[in-house]
Amino acid sequence: MVLDSNWTGEYTRPGPRLYPHQWSWDSAFIAFGYARYDQKRAIQELRHLFDNQWTNGLLPQIVFDPHFGEYFPGIDFWHAECSESAVCVYKTSGVVQPPIHATATLHVYRHGVDRPGARAFLEEAFPRLVAWHDYLYRERDPENEGLVYIRHPWESGMDNSPLWDAIMLRMQLRSHEIPAYRRVDTHVVSPADRPESAAYDRFAYLVQLFSRLNYDEARIREDCPFLVQDVLFNSLLCQGERDLAQIAQLIGEDPSPNEERAGKTAGAVNRKLWDEEHGTYLDFDLATGQPIRVYAAAGFLPLFAGIPEEQCARRMVERLKTTGFDLGGEGMIAVPSYDPLGFGFSPSRYWRGPVWINIDWLLMRGLERYGYEKHARGLRESIVNLVRDNGFYEYFNPRTGVGHGSDLFSWSAALLLDAMSDSWW
């Protein structure tokens, strides 16, 4: 079984060759699958991540296994020890990933067979989740809007998306500004599947900038060319705050601060990120003060958090059905990560158009939430068929179903298990 083969005893590798370390939102998605059949492993998956949290609350994107040195960017490239907040857990990256961890933690509790053990884990995880969300609102929302920003494409989870093209183009780097590095990913999978070298130059530049500024968020905010209020990130934070409020109630804590923040974030997403003309949500570039008018599947994921009003949700579903995303149609395997009618679409290159199981799973659960059962069933069938017919790949060609990227990919297996189970809402 994929999850068993990738289990290390402490965490689950996302992929056996390309991804040997622990990734933050991967582990949360993996925990959704484990919750269906192995509560102890689900808890350990999240606990190992929480045990490497920075003292300021930052939950790192990667926790490195020092036994796997052949990886870029590795421990020595990040220099997390430059931050006073990471002195005890410096074997991590210095960026984050989308905050779906409170949702995963509550899911583990709901499906736990050992109820006392599951409740004990809620009590253990609660202060860590509070610190994580507090860090985001304190350090990434300086105007107190209720929207937090990301400062690196890797923080979106959608590293190579066309969403970031305009910002990447603005970053005109001289040769001395590009750090020396050697990629490993293109020696493991096809280079045609992976981000191009120009993108990696900019990814590496940002990492170097963060370490040079000692991971001081105020200084980073002043100098970083990439500051984006991201739809997916804030939607998951909103749902995470709601789930954190439920956890608070279960363990006898006050849920009102989390309920208030969830409401504030939902209101800000609707007010600032909704695109009335096109019936979807758009990321916002803080450097230009303008929306990023690129149409990706992530723009529909406020449905997962229950953010849009019913009328807006209907418009979103209609757009999914009548555009290149082709929800419920026959021309495309639903739902590609980027609009196939958009400039720069690629059916096989990382985050530039392939189908990703996690995005379709989030959208499936969102459609269920709003009562679009027919469309949710269609997405569930698509997830099952993709994996059954093509294997447990990282992502899939939306025209042919052929798998790309890492094989034996853990969240594809975990979310398949959850997708085949009951509805949440």
Image: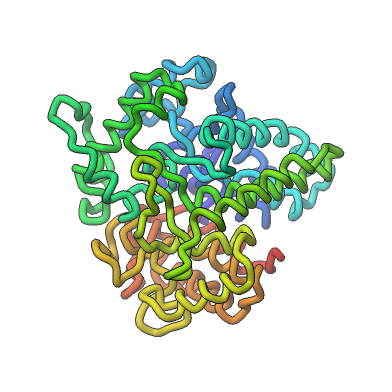
Q: How many marks?
A: 0
Tell me residue 224's x, y (percent): 35, 31
Q: Is 189 positioned to the left or the right of 421 in the image? A: left
Q: Report if residue 5 is visible in the image.
A: yes
Tell me residue 143's x, y (percent): 53, 36
Residue at left offset 83%, top offset 45%: 250
Task: Answer with the quarter of the image where residue 341 lies.
Answer: bottom left
Question: In this rendering, is residue 48 above or below 89?
Answer: below
Residue at left offset 56%, top offset 27%: 52
Question: In this rendering, is residue 42 above or below 302?
Answer: above
Q: Nearer the viewer, residue 268 or 166?
A: 268
Question: In which quadrant of the rendered image does the C terminus lie?
Answer: bottom right
Question: In this rendering, is residue 399 above or below 62?
Answer: below
- What kind of colouring is applied to the model shown? rainbow
Task: Answer with the quarter of the image where residue 249 lies.
Answer: top right
Task: Looking at this view, name the residue that lies furthest to the right.
Answer: 252
Q: Nearer the viewer, residue 193 or 403?
A: 193
Residue at left offset 77%, top offset 48%: 246
Residue at left offset 78%, top offset 42%: 256
Q: Report if residue 39 is visible in the image.
A: no
Q: Nearer the viewer, residue 103 or 72?
A: 103
Task: Looking at this view, name the residue that lies furthest to the left.
Answer: 175
